[in-house]
Image (cartoon, grey):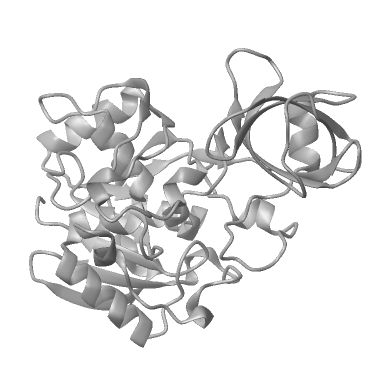
Amino acid sequence: MRIEDLDYDLPGELIAQEPLPERDASKLMVLDVGFDAIDHRLFTELPTLLAPSLFIFNDTRVFPARLKGRKETGGKVELLLLRKTEERGDSWLAMGRASKALRPDMKLVLCDGLLRGKVLQVLGDGQLEIELEAAGDVDEVIEKVGEVPLPPYIRRPAEETDRARYQTVYACRVGAVAAPTAGLHFTKRLLTALEEAGHQTAYVTLHVGPGTFRPVHLDRLDDHRMDEECYEVPQPTVDAIVRARAERRPVVAVGTTVVRTLESAIDVAGIPRAGIGQTRLFIKPPHRFRVVDHLVTNFHLPRSTLLALVMAFAGVKLTRRAYLEGIDRKYRFYSYGDAMLIRGTRA
């Protein structure tokens, strides 16, 4: 595939700027790969649209990773914390923006002085290593004063309500700088409805980094390199997948991050291995999916690796039809937008 294969024109007014009042009130486009068909439903109908299945969720938790402030000598600074480095206790890998270039040993005053920073290293691709300090525990201060890192296509400042809404109701493993957005539609009520309909649930963790949403700029998709992201597959989830296969129960990935986690951890028998790992897996057509039978996902940006994954799962032509139909029917796009269920051909 080439980069132009991931293009489509989206009217700006269809980019959702706010979440709906109710998480599960979104529209749900249903793609049936085997029948090459598209249907239009509501997200609350999801439990009734599949035979009893195993739903697998990403339980990563977004932390308030955006810190604003200034250099000690003046000049605005904005940091996006990515993750702690293993070498130092309060040292972070971060993306940095400033009025003038940041340099090693430069000191920063962040969040009205509640955090102070020092640039340890300037790395490639706009990344820095930053040492942070505070009067109390640094992690606790970040949690209190950091901003929710809303994606740039949401053209407004983060609000207090985003701390809850840009987070899944089952999030528990802190480490993501972006939400696994397919999971934002689920409520506790809907999770109960899944159980009552005979579905089972399990969890993996993939700490979503900014590279997941970075546009592809190279002409050939094969030349694009994904940023590394950390994942964990618990043994109970592996056991649940093995049981599902024995019972001929379909596996439903809630989000592209779950797909990438399961496909990254797979063994020669087609079952994910339990444990912690790092992945740079870029799924694009053609790809043989070994674990996932169905996919719940959102509508993704053009020229994105996420759209390439959806095309690999649903097929290029059906995906293009679905996106054109979504635009025609005024679906809401991206993180706070509507959802899609792709029923695959494996189950």
Residue at 51% in and 53% down? 188
Q: Is residue 229 above or below residue 234?
A: below
Left or right of 177 on screen, residue 269: left
Q: Is residue 125 visible?
A: yes
In the picture, which quadrant includes the N terminus?
bottom left
Image-quadrant location for residue 93: top right
Q: Is residue 271 above or below residue 158?
A: above
Q: Is residue 233 visible?
A: no
Horizontal and vertical percent position of residue 166: 59, 54
Q: Tell me the quarter of the picture where residue 204 sits.
A: top left
Which residue is located at x 11 percent, y 34 percent?
A: 246
Viewer-proximal residue, 296 or 84?
84
In this view, 339 is above or below 312: below
Give x and y (percent) for residue 175: 56, 34
Query: Which quadrant would residue 109 be assigned to in this image?
Result: top right
Front position in the image: 345 or 239: 345
